[in-house]
Amino acid sequence: MTDSSPKYALGIDFGTSSARTLLLNLLSGEEAALCELPYAHGVIDRTLPVTGERLDADWALHDPDDYIPVLERGIARVLSDVPGAAQHVIGIGVDATCCSVLPVTADGVPLCRIERWRGHPHAWLKLWKHHAPARIARRLSQVAAERREPFLARCGGLVSSEWYFPKIIETWLEDRPVYDAAAGFVEVADWLVWYLCGRLRRGASPAAYKALWSAEDGLPPDSFFAAAFPGFGPPDQKLGRDFYQLGTPAGRIRPELAARLGLPSAVTVAVGNIDAFAAFPGAGVKGPGTFFMTIGTSACDLVVHDKQIPLSGITGVAKDGIIPGLYGYEAGEAATGDMLGWFARTMAPVGDTAVLLAELETGAAKLAPGETGLVALDWWNGNRSILADADLSGTIVGLTLQTGPAEIYRALLEAIAFGNTTILNNFRQVGFEFTEIVACGGIAEKSPLLMQLIADVSGMSLSVPAATEVTARGAALFGAVAAGAFPDISSAAWALRPAMAHRYSPDRRAGAVYQDVYGIFTALHDALGRDHAGWLHELKRIKGRMAGTVSHVPL
């Protein structure tokens, strides 16, 4: 940018529990103001708010009415923190968890907001970690393999229960009236962009990674879905076929909304993005050679390359999916912060979880590599990569009467590090070369111990950017590109890249110990995740069958 007049962009990152709004100075790269607001309801995974109906295992819903208040309050708050900035805002970028899909009317009204449908669980927003359609995903994977569908090569060989079609086929199978009443099923980021500018502009990146779409081949053929679930389809009936690339304008902010927020009516709204994908340029990463991870509730791992290389165990690859001009690869771990939070809540269900996590971190840091005598498999929410099996469950091996909370907590941290290295090695085995790891997200900032463990286990240096909210920063950069402030996202990422706040070098002595422990982890990973996965699957089936069968326990 050569114009020296003030310019700002807004980036809004909608996570699992809260939304973060960032006002980014496009001249200096300074994070001028930041606001984080929790959702009123948060994850709905036990009972439906309206009826009290008990939800089955692996359900995870959101109330879409959690989103709009934090969007508007967040924008208003950051603008109030920097007087005079509002008139210089040129773009807005939005990212959200994915695949988090919402059934809507033709006007974009969520079905669960309509009285007739509020008592229907399938009418609510299904969050990314809604894993209930695992059996549907397995059926889609089986039929795709039998038919040798070309999209399988782009998604690591398996369809995930986290994705678009398993979730909407689940609705089609279990609540046909809701499916028929929905004019469409929309990614939450696309729905928020729709709210901001009044136009539905579905993002190409979510479609490519979560809806089996590609620019070359489009959506899978009708015949594929007919073979898997006769009567379902066509696939574009609720999804459409028009998708828009990252960094392109979705439209201008709605005039009435601009007036209410005090923004110029010329503000450009960018096409929506996946949260982790926005973080990639937000951290200043722009090319191959970096293994990038965002680690919060879950972990998403991203890699870019100038070639498309066949690779199993990933969750997707698409050209232009992360950075235009490059192939973007996605993998990840389904439970990181979620797993650590579970342990803290289990240890102190009435106490302050944040305080206990800090105490556990301190205690775990005092233990030497291998001192716990434990190995854990981090499958508290299933395995995303490299097994793509949502029905796997977590395991801790080596417990004794001497095992304490700090030992278990460290074993969980080590499991995250081992899972990360398993993903790294999966890329390395087909020729990917990495020079560094860059990590961002809440856990990257709050757990120096985990960052050091990842460096020790992987044998690679790891850096954490000095930006407060890397994901919201990336969303703001896409807003700036859509508004014409930069020619492309790579230019914006490099021009405004943040410094690195922390660097972790691998400890070779620790790494030598962890080679032995990782060998045990790998053996357990393959035994319980491949050879005998049926054991864990059967435990989950028994649990589901028996849940709620005992109404009371006699004293």
Image (spheres, rainbow, N blue to C red):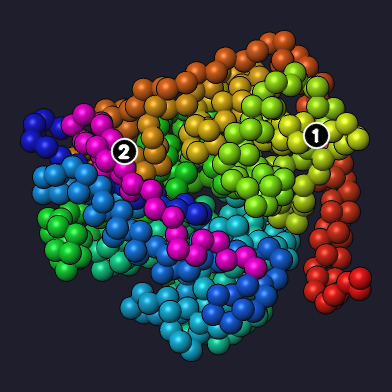
Q: Is residue 292 above or below residue 230?
A: above
Is residue 434 in view from this perspective?
A: yes
Q: Is residue 432 left or right of residue 390?
A: left
Residue 347: quarter of image = top right
Quadrant of image for the N terminus: top left
Q: Is residue 5 left or right of residue 71?
A: left
Nearest the viewer among 470 and 555 is 555
Residue at image mark 1: 404
SS under mark 2 = helix
Q: Provide residue 390's location: percent of width, then percent of height.
A: 71, 55
**Viewer-nearest of discs 1 and 2:** 1
Residue at image mark 2: 489
Q: In the image, what residue type sits under mark 2?
A: Ile
Q: Is residue 486 above or below residue 119?
A: above
Residue 120: quarter of image = bottom right
Q: Which residues are magenta?
A: 21-46
Q: Is residue 509 left or right of residue 435?
A: right
Numbered badge on residue 547? none
Q: Provide residue 93's location: percent of width, then percent of height.
A: 30, 50
As for residue 40 lying within the magenta part, the answer is: yes
